């Protein structure tokens, strides 16, 4: 914004109390790029920002801001510098524990800052009955995406818990991570880790580790079709009866997101784990979802979902198949 007096400046106010005059350069992947009045290009996560004050007719201009800063320095009594890492004035006990606290603090700050770079999607659905029948069922899930140079990261979790007349009848949780690497073209290298717990499959833990090659047929905003295949290994802990099983597998996966209509998306991921040692050990996990956009910003959606899990050789007295259908409310933050 310009006037006869010059270019008006914006004021960036941080949560720390710092006020930085300058001009916004744009918002990308959860970061605000800011050009200070001295020409420095700065980068701040949204969580670090309290507000941005825009110019008004009485705001200082770029032409006279240096004079204002000089006058403020002359009229201000300097305060002694404070170094938050200076331990010299602390009691001995605090000097011993402070390095540990500082390490935890820095790790937490880095984690929060990095998490803001991920696209985040949260899902929740449930059914609750109280009266002649007492039933509760909750289905929750989440997906997180991030592109890091030549890497694409995808984290996801899902869980179901239910009870009927005070007796738990569903308790299953999973957490997965997939990383794709692609320098150029459609071919990728991938690494995947999948973890699962299912009380009613008598499964205390199942961990599957895989890596190999993949191919992106489509990979854009409205179409995503990826194939992955490679070797893997699965480690399982069962109970009732106690059983530990480690198998070497082949890994195959098809992942697809497809815009059916302007406000409707279809999403599916099917993973197959055939054992290379025992052909009876075949596991298939297939998740399907139809999403209906509820707002103009594409943040809120309604999801109709179906999950199929098949285990060709389950633990004793357990069925090989589980099918779960759900209706969930979905929120996405980009």
Image (cartoon, rainbow, N blue to C red):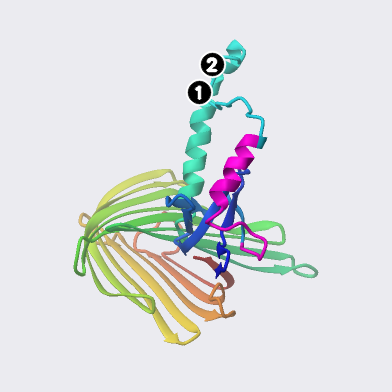
Say whether residue 62 is magenta: yes
Total marks placed: 2
Dots 1, 2 in contact, CB < 8 A: yes
Residue that mark 1 sits on: 99
Q: Which mark is residue 293?
A: none
Instruction: Report if residue 202 is visible in the image.
Output: no
Q: Residues within 10 Å of mark 1 (few under 14, many from 20)?
A: few
Residue shown at 26% from the left, 69% from the top: 227
In this view, 205 is above or below 215: above
In this view, 11 is above or below 109: below
Residue shown at 37% from the left, 70% from the top: 269
In this view, 102 is above or below 333: above
| Horizontal relation, residue 204 to residue 78: left or right | left
Measuring from the top left, give residue 225's x and y in whole percent: 31, 75
Instruction: Report if residue 146 is visible in the image.
Output: yes
| Horizontal relation, residue 157 to residue 93: left or right | left
Q: Residues within 10 Å of mark 2 (few under 14, many from 20)?
A: few
Point out the residue furthest to the top here. 92
Residue shown at 45% from the left, 51% from the top: 42
Which residue is nearer to you in this view: 271 or 278?
271
Which residue is nearer to you in this view: 280 or 57?
57
Measuring from the top left, give residue 120's x and y in whole percent: 50, 61
Quadrant in the picture for residue 255 = bottom left
In the picture, which quadrant includes the N terminus?
bottom right
Residue that mark 2 sits on: 96
Magenta stretch? 54-74
Measuring from the top left, give residue 244's x and y in whole percent: 36, 44
Say whether residue 214 is magenta: no
Secondary structure beneath dot 1 equals helix
């Amino acid at each position: 914004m310009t006037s006869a007096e010059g270019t008006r400046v914006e004021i960036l106010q941080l949560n720390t109390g710092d006020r930085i005059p300058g001009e916004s350069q744009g918002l990308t992947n959860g970061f605000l790029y800011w050009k200070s009045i001295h020409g420095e290009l700065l980068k701040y996560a949204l969580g670090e920002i309290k507000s941005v004050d825009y110019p008004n007719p009485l705001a200082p201009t770029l032409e006279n801001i240096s004079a204002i800063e000089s006058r403020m320095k002359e009229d201000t009594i300097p305060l002694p510098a404070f170094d938050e890492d200076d331990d010299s004035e602390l009691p001995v006990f605090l000097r011993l524990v402070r390095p540990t606290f500082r390490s935890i603090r820095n790790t937490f700050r880095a984690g929060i800052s990095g998490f803001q770079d991920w696209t985040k999607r949260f899902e929740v659905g449930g059914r609750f009955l109280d009266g002649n029948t007492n039933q509760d069922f909750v289905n929750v899930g989440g997906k997180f995406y991030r592109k890091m140079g030549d890497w694409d990261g995808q984290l996801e979790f899902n869980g179901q818990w239910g009870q009927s007349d005070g007796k738990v009848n569903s308790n299953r949780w999973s957490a997965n991570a997939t990383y794709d690497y692609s320098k150029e073209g459609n071919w990728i290298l991938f690494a995947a880790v999948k973890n699962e717990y299912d009380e009613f499959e008598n499964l205390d833990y199942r961990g599957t580790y895989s890596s190999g090659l993949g191919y992106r047929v489509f990979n854009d905003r409205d179409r995503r079709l990826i194939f992955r295949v490679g070797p893997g290994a699965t480690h399982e802990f069962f109970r009732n009866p106690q059983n530990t099983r480690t198998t070497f597998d082949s890994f195959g996966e098809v992942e697809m997101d497809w815009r059916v209509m302007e406000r409707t998306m279809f999403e599916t991921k099917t993973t197959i784990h055939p054992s290379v040692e025992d052909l009876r050990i075949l596991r298939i996990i297939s998740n399907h979802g139809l999403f209906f956009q509820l707002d103009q910003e594409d943040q809120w959606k309604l999801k109709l979902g179906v999950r199929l899990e098949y285990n060709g050789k389950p633990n004793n007295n357990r069925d090989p198949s589980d099918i779960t259908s759900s209706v969930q409310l979905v929120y996405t933050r980009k």
